[in-house]
């Protein structure tokens, strides 16, 4: 990784006295664009961690207590700083910073580090040693646990730097607008970003569903991930970032860069002022919905332009519950989400436990490949009581809701793979007066969509898992972002087949994975025949404004062009041309 310096940017080869570049032909690096927007500014690199710790001798017996205090002081200072930043941030950013502070104070790793200090290991080495053990264990567990190693490494580096009296590693805070480059960003790095100073983000690793992408979307910072070739671009180089195309362009004339940024500013203003209802320029209606995970999130989403909830991830309400919540407890939680949306559509997903979302009370056994194991509805159909108690709670919460156009609760099961599973789930839901649907996450459902539709009232395509299972690529892997990209023509083909099957029988087919939040891909999904798009509430305006700018026929042509492409980059490129984006 390039050396980091905090100097003001140096003049680049070919720069004229006024700072504009005339002699260099534009040259570009491509990654996966995850948040649209244009930025033009010098690069600032995330500070690299020192490769080796300075040698410190073994601590003599009489100095060990003071060494333990040195370690604890380092932890306290880092955690307090994160907490302070959390209190100044809002939304997901604030939650992420608070969660990182809690992890920094975690007794488990601190105990292991203090044990090393008791044995004579100096504090920095003790932090490094204890964290390395945890990182190795988490990596072996895979899935969400392996993702947590980014946080652990981040905390390790911050605490070690604090103990050594070095500047805090991680994101620099330049005093001029910059584009931040990094190999990867820890959640705490991303959450603390100031969009006024960091005008765009580009990482070598990470995928469309990574933390970096999710928070950049919330902060509306143009963002590109999986741009593996940026390593040779030094600090201070002026770059043009296009978060839609996923390109980092060098050698752009300064006047042109500024003009493009200004034009993009007008686009952002259109997004900010978009008020719906969602339709294409020629009046084709699109239902835009929100993804939520609890009452608070639903109340916030109700203030957006979302017409209802397309995905209520119920398992996220119970990640820390040691025991199964009672029917009454569940009813109260689901009731909050229903209440936030009055009589409007709310699609509740039954517990998607397992794999990256372990639930303590779901009694899961250790599996070598949890993403391919007993997860989602597979747990509910084995432990029928768990599923039926949840359906009872959804029905009870639904029975007290305000009457409206869509006040009957919609409920869908995750990880359905066979028609009999769907039929059984639908029967259990109908017995309770709930409208049954299923998620399309396993390719088998897309392939046999008409057979599934004979049993359920709607389908909702989970593109995060559908991409993972179609491309045989772990959605958590920062190295496989190109494969898990929902722009993969194979994934688009399955979506098209599913949408067609829905249209043939007049039943709705939505998309509720991250793909729905990508404004360009949203147009392609509508062109493929999808009837609703559900996404994080902050993404709704950008998708609505983009749809308003194109005709339905253009969406259909963009879809056909993307289907005919041979890879995800070509699909994105060809669709963008058709949509003039
Ligand atoms: C999906 O797989 O696209 C989806 C929406 O479900 P989750 O991301 O919760 O697995
Ligand atoms: Mg899923």
Image: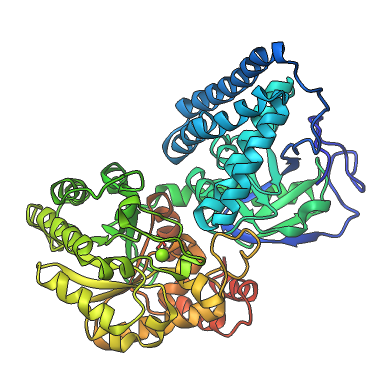
Judged left or right of residue 242, residue 143 is: left
Question: What residue is drawn where x is 69% and y is 28%?
Answer: 160
Would you place residue 307 above or below residue 148 in this image?
Answer: below
Would you place residue 478 above or below residue 490 in this image?
Answer: above
* Image location of residue 226, percent across then percent down: 66, 59
Judged left or right of residue 481, residue 402 is: left
* Residue 106 in sight: no
* Image location of residue 376, percent across then percent down: 35, 65
Give the image's coloring scheme. rainbow
In the image, 76 versus 526, the foreground residue is 76
* Ligand 2 rendered quadrant: bottom left
* Image location of residue 235, percent across then percent down: 80, 41
Judged left or right of residue 424, residue 358 is: right
Would you place residue 401 above or below residue 75 in this image?
Answer: below
User: Total marks drawn?
Assistant: 0
In the image, 157 versus 38, the foreground residue is 157
Judged left or right of residue 298, residue 226 is: right
Question: What residue is drawn where x is 67% and y is 51%?
Answer: 203
Instruction: Look at the image and tell me in which quarter the C terminus lies.
Output: bottom right
In the image, 385 versus 300, the foreground residue is 385
* Image location of residue 26, percent across then percent down: 81, 59
| Quarter residue 406 falls in | bottom left
């Amino acid at each position: 990784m390039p050396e980091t310096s905090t100097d003001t940017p140096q003049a680049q080869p070919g720069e004229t006295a006024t700072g504009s570049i005339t002699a260099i032909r534009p040259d570009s690096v491509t990654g996966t664009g995850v948040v649209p927007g244009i930025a033009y500014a010098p690069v600032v690199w995330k500070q690299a961690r020192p490769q080796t710790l300075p040698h410190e001798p073994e601590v003599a017996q009489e100095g060990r207590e003071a060494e333990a205090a040195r370690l604890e002081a380092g932890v306290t200072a880092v955690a307090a700083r994160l907490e302070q930043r959390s209190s100044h941030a809002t939304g997901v950013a604030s939650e992420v910073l608070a969660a990182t502070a809690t992890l920094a104070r975690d007794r488990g790793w601190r105990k292991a580090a203090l044990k090393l200090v008791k044995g004579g290991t100096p504090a920095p080495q003790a932090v490094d040693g204890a964290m390395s053990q945890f990182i190795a264990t988490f990596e072996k567990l895979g899935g969400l646990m392996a993702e947590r190693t980014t946080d652990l490494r981040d905390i390790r580096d911050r605490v070690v730097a604090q103990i050594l009296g070095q500047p805090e590693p991680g994101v620099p805070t330049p005093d001029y607008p910059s584009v931040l480059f990094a190999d990867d960003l820890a959640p705490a790095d991303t959450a603390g970003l100031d969009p006024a100073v960091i005008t765009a983000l580009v990482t070598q690793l990470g995928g469309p569903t990574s933390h970096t992408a999710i928070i950049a979307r919330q902060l509306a910072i143009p963002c590109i991930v999986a741009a593996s070739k940026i390593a040779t671009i030094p600090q201070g180089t002026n770059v043009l970032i296009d978060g839609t195309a996923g390109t980092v362009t060098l050698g752009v004339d300064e006047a042109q860069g500024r003009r493009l940024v200004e034009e993009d500013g007008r686009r952002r203003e259109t997004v900010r002022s978009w008020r719906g209802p969602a339709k294409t320029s020629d009046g084709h209606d699109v239902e835009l919905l929100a993804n939520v995970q609890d009452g608070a999130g639903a109340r916030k989403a109700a203030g957006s332009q979302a017409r209802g909830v397309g995905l209520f991830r119920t398992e996220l309400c119970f990640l820390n519950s040691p025991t199964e919540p009672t029917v009454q407890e569940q009813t109260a939680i689901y009731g909050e989400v229903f209440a936030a949306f009055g009589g409007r559509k709310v699609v509740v997903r039954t517990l998607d436990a397992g794999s990256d979302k372990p639930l303590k009370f779901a009694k899961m056994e250790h599996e070598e490949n949890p993403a391919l194991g007993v997860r989602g509805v597979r747990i509910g159909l084995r432990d029928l009581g768990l599923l039926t108690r949840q359906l009872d709670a959804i029905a009870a919460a639904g029975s007290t809701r305000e009457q409206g156009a869509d006040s009957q609760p919609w409920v869908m099961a995750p990880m359905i793979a066979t028609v009999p599973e769907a039929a059984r789930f639908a029967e259990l839901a109908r017995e309770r007066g709930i409208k049954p649907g299923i998620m399309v996450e396993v390719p088998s459902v897309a392939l046999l969509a008409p057979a599934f539709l004979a049993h359920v009232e709607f389908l909702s395509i989970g593109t995060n898992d559908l991409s993972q299972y179609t491309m045989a690529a772990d959605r958590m892997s920062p190295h496989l972002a190109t494969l898990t990209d929902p722009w993969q023509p194979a994934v688009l083909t399955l979506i098209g087949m599913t949408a067609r099957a829905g249209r043939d029988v007049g039943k709705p087919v939505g998309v509720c994975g991250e793909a729905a939040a990508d404004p360009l891909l949203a147009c392609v999904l509508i062109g493929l025949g999808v009837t609703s798009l559900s996404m994080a509430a902050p993404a709704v305006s950008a998708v609505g404004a983009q749809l308003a700018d194109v005709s339905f026929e253009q969406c259909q042509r963009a879809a056909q062009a993307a289907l005919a492409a041979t890879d995800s980059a070509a699909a994105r490129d060809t669709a963008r041309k058709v949509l003039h984006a």
